[in-house]
Image: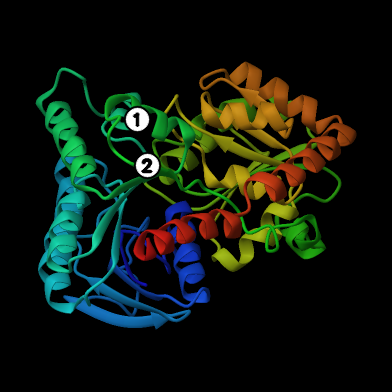
């Protein structure tokens, strides 16, 4: 097959979408298919184009994947004007330059969010005569409402809903990363074909043996418990909840909170930690993906927080923690909470319950046996249910079968 991925986010950027899509692209290549990625100049989450990139377009090859990059307006600001400029600059550049530079294809998969990129995906799928796959990682505009960014009575919400429906109706297949995402789509659009393309984890790469004493010392975990958050420091994560819980247990010692990554909220979080006088919390710079398995395996508790209930949100770091045999402290409702409870892989706290979060930290901190048992449960579930290779193979086999049937 000849397959195109259209996505605003791709390595060398860090993030869940980048890891998931690049891993899926590599699996297509391993199975003998031709893979092309059309993406933006890397700028996320720093808000500036990475060194070595820039200009109107750039071509490169990684892991046997042909990558075409086009212009984007980079920004880390979260206001509407800057975000829309960021999104639509890539919608425009990918549509125009993709028309000229992309090969003909059997399938074109477009990643949403941003929802607006569906417009470029619809256009390019027609030009390249490809079947359009609309991949939904987060339900928009519903997620924007949950985060307080949109009101359901606003014009922007109504227009986003119409665009969402337009993209679903034009797609040959709508894939989603969570069962709750597909349930929502199937309820509203029962005639739209769907496929569960869930997040997962490379269980060979993420395992308990990856932990090292050197990384453990870097986390400051000698003689104590380390609670780790590694990922985007953004609005949706609600990391201020972690700081509030860290304050409540600060006088008790024996637990260190380490926040690794970057994002639009990082400076504000660092200022809040300083204002709270936290001496049990440290912020570290982002690390390359190759360092993440050792980082996760060297911690004692993996923090997976969300600011509020977001429909269909199942953070990929949940699966990474489970595969590494580390207990999850999840601050979330919905499908992510169901996964942790079903597999007894950690402790679940409702968003906003900082007292409950502090109590959960104490419970895990004070019981190595409980952490061990939850870690074993998580590893078993990751192997049986969330192995990314098996998830990718089921998806690829569906596309292969559709071409030969």
Where 347 falls versus 121 (above or below)?
above
For label 2, the crowd category at 10 Å Cα-Cα, with few meaning under 14, some 14 to 19 and many 20 or more, is: many
The residue positioned 16% from the left and 54% from the top of the image is: 122
Q: Quadrant of residue 3?
A: bottom left
Look at mark 2 in the image and give the residue it sits on: 194
Tell which circle, 2 or 1, labels the residue nearer the N-terminal end: 1
The residue positioned 60% from the left and 26% from the top of the image is: 338
Quarter of the image with the C terminus is bottom left
Labels in figure, total: 2
Where 26 falls versus 273 (above or below)?
below
Q: Position of residue 48 (x, y in %)?
A: 29, 63
In the image as oriented, which residue stretches furthest toward the right? Answer: 369
Quarter of the image with the N terminus is bottom left
> Judging from the image, what secondary structure is the residue with disc 2 in?
strand
Residue 256 in sight in this render: yes
The residue positioned 71% from the left and 20% from the top of the image is: 359
Q: Position of residue 148 (x, y in %)?
A: 30, 25
Q: CA distance from mark 2 to mark 1?
A: 8 Å
- Between 252 and 28, the one nearer to me in the picture: 28
Q: Position of residue 342 (x, y in %)?
A: 68, 28
Residue 311 in sight in this render: no
- Between 130 and 316, the one nearer to me in the picture: 130
- Between 52 and 279, the one nearer to me in the picture: 52
Look at mark 1 in the image and give the residue it sits on: 186
Q: Position of residue 35 (x, y in %)?
A: 37, 74
The residue positioned 46% from the left and 35% from the top of the image is: 313
């Amino acid at each position: 097959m000849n397959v195109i991925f259209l996505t605003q986010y791709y390595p060398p950027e860090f993030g869940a979408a980048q890891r998931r899509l690049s891993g899926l692209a590599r699996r297509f290549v391993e199975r003998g298919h031709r893979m092309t990625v059309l993406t933006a100049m890397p700028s996320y989450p720093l808000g500036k184009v990475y060194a070595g990139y820039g200009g109107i377009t750039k071509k490169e090859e990684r892991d046997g994947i042909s990558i075409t990059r086009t212009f984007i307006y980079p920004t880390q600001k979260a206001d509407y004007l800057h975000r829309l400029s960021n999104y639509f600059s890539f919608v425009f550049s990918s549509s125009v330059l993709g028309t000229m530079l992309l090969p003909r294809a059997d399938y074109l998969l477009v990643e949403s969010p941003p929802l607006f990129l569906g417009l470029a995906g619809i256009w390019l799928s027609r030009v390249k005569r490809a079947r359009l796959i609309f991949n939904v990682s987060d339900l928009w505009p519903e997620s924007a409402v949950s985060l307080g960014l949109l009101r359901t009575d606003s014009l922007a919400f109504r227009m986003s809903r119409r665009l969402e429906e337009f993209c679903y109706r034009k797609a040959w297949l709508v894939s989603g990363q969570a069962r709750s995402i597909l349930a929502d789509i199937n309820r509203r659009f029962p005639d739209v074909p769907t496929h569960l393309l869930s997040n997962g984890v490379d269980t060979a790469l993420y395992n308990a043996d990856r932990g090292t004493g050197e990384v453990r010392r870097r986390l400051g975990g000698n003689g104590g418990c380390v609670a780790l958050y590694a990922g985007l420091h953004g609005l949706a994560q609600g990391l201020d909840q972690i700081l509030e819980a860290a304050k409540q247990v600060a006088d008790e010692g024996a637990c260190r909170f380490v926040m690794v990554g970057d994002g639009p909220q990082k400076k504000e979080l660092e200022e809040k930690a300083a204002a709270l006088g936290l001496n049990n919390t440290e912020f570290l710079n982002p690390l390359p993906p190759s360092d993440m398995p050792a980082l996760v395996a060297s911690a004692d508790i993996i923090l997976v927080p969300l600011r509020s209930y977001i429909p269909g949100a199942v953070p990929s770091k949940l699966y990474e923690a489970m595969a590494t045999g580390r207990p999850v402290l999840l601050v979330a409702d919905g499908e992510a909470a169901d996964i942790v409870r079903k597999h007894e892989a950690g402790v679940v706290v409702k968003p906003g319950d900082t007292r409950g979060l502090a109590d959960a930290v104490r419970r895990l901190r004070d019981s190595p046996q409980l952490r061990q048992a939850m870690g074993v449960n998580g590893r078993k579930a990751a192997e049986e249910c969330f192995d990314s290779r098996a998830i990718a193979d089921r998806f690829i086999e569906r596309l292969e079968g559709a071409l030969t049937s």
